[in-house]
């Protein structure tokens, strides 16, 4: 019983600290054409900046001209203003993988939301 | 008289119809601009070039000072080698703002290739010895911070006439980050923006 209560407290605590980061394809017309296969994060030891790498695949027989943008947040959930929050081009070749590699604008950035659109 | 009235009425009718056809001025949604591309450089191009340069600089490690402190950056010569009347600050300012936000760099406005960006740093020091000013509030000698790094570059334009009568315009954004102590370029970046359109379009 005591272990169960401890486990419950741990789960609730960790749930509150859970990362709010995610990658989302926002255009319904390409949602089925593009799959997100891997997301890697790290904090560069030298720069102290968070790096994000998203790998995905274009499952269609067509070249897709997509775009992406990243919004970064500090530990208190406030958005960090950055030029990277504007849309950037993402050329994706047919039946091929693609990679998005971004660096956070500041060492205060802990969470992110990356959006992919057509 | 009747003819004059007819002409006047016709003119008024034409003016009324034409005013309805005139395009209204609208504000651009700078966050989601779906407007057509132009042959010249517009703000979208500067945003893209600046964003690429910043990401490249931050990833390279060239701005990671060993003690975690910030580098002092001076803006050197950034040449406009295009046919357009652009201010290279349209690119450089965006880069400066992002670098400042990163906590890696602070820009000096007391020194630049074109003289002090803000002449006040030196002008305020001319108040030394001026009895009108409280000398305790005048900046002391040896307090200005000299730059460690310098940012220089060029924006290049190449126009190419195509066989089908169209023209292709290529814009090259070239930047270099130099360590002033050694004269070595610790970071270099280049991005290209290409446009293709009517041979009658002007890119200046």
Image: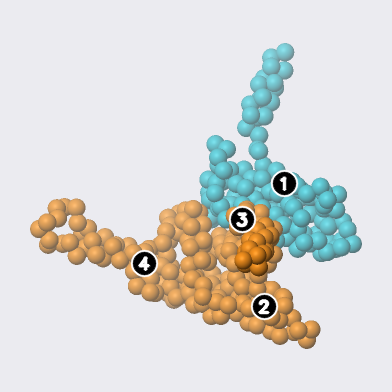
* Image colouring: by chain
Side of B158 where A23 appears, left or right: right
Mark closer to the observer (3, 2): 3
* Mark 3 vs mark 1, CA separation in Å: 33 Å
Q: Which of marks 2 and 3 precedes in the sequence?
A: 3
Q: Using the numbered discs, state the Cα–Cα distance from disc 3 to disc 2 in whole angstroms.
A: 23 Å
The Cα–Cα distance between marks 4 and 1, rounded to whole angstroms, is 41 Å
Callout 2: chain: B
As drawn, the label of residue B26 is 3
The answer to whether residue A33 shows anywhere in this view is yes
Q: Which residue is mark 2?
A: B201
Tags 4 and 1 both on a single chain: no
Residue at which label 1 appears:
A23
Q: Quadrant of the N terminus of chain A?
A: top right
Chain A takes which shade in the image?
cyan
Q: Secondary structure at mark 3?
A: loop
SS assignment at label 2:
loop
Residue A74 at x, y percent in the picture: 55, 42
Residue most extreme to the left: B131
Real-space CA distance between mark 4 and mark 2, rounded to the nearest whole angstrom = 36 Å
Q: Which chain is orange?
A: B
Same chain for labels 3 and 2? Say yes or no. yes
């Amino acid at each position: 019983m005591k272990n169960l209560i401890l486990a419950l407290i741990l789960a609730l605590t960790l749930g509150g600290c859970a990362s709010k980061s995610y990658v989302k394809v926002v255009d319904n017309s390409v949602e089925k054409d593009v799959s997100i296969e891997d997301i890697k994060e790290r904090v560069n030891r030298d720069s102290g900046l968070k790096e994000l790498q998203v790998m995905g695949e274009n499952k269609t027989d067509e070249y897709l001209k997509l775009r992406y943008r990243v919004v970064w947040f500090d530990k208190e959930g406030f958005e960090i203003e950055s030029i990277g929050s504007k849309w950037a081009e993402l050329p994706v070749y047919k039946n091929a993988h693609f990679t998005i590699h971004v660096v956070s604008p500041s060492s205060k950035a802990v969470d992110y939301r990356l959006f992919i659109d057509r | 008289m009747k003819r004059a009235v007819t002409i006047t009425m016709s003119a008024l009718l034409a003016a009324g119809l034409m005013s309805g056809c005139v395009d209204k001025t609208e504000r651009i949604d700078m966050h989601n601009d779906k407007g057509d591309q132009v042959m010249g450089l517009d703000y979208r191009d500067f945003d893209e070039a600046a964003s690429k340069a910043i990401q490249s600089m931050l990833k390279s490690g060239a701005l990671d000072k060993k003690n975690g402190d910030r580098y002092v950056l001076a803006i050197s010569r950034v040449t406009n080698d295009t046919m357009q009347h652009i201010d290279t600050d349209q690119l450089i300012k965006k880069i400066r703002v992002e670098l400042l936000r990163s906590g890696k760099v602070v820009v000096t406005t007391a020194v630049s290739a074109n003289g002090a960006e803000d002449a006040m740093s030196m002008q305020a020091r001319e108040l030394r010895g001026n009895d009108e000013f409280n000398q305790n509030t005048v900046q002391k000698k040896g307090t200005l911070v000299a730059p460690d790094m310098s940012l220089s570059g060029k924006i290049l334009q190449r126009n190419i006439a195509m066989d089908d009568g169209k023209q292709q315009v290529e814009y090259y954004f070239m930047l270099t980050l130099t360590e002033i102590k050694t004269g070595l370029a610790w970071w270099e970046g280049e991005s290209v923006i290409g446009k293709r359109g009517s041979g009658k379009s002007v890119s200046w």
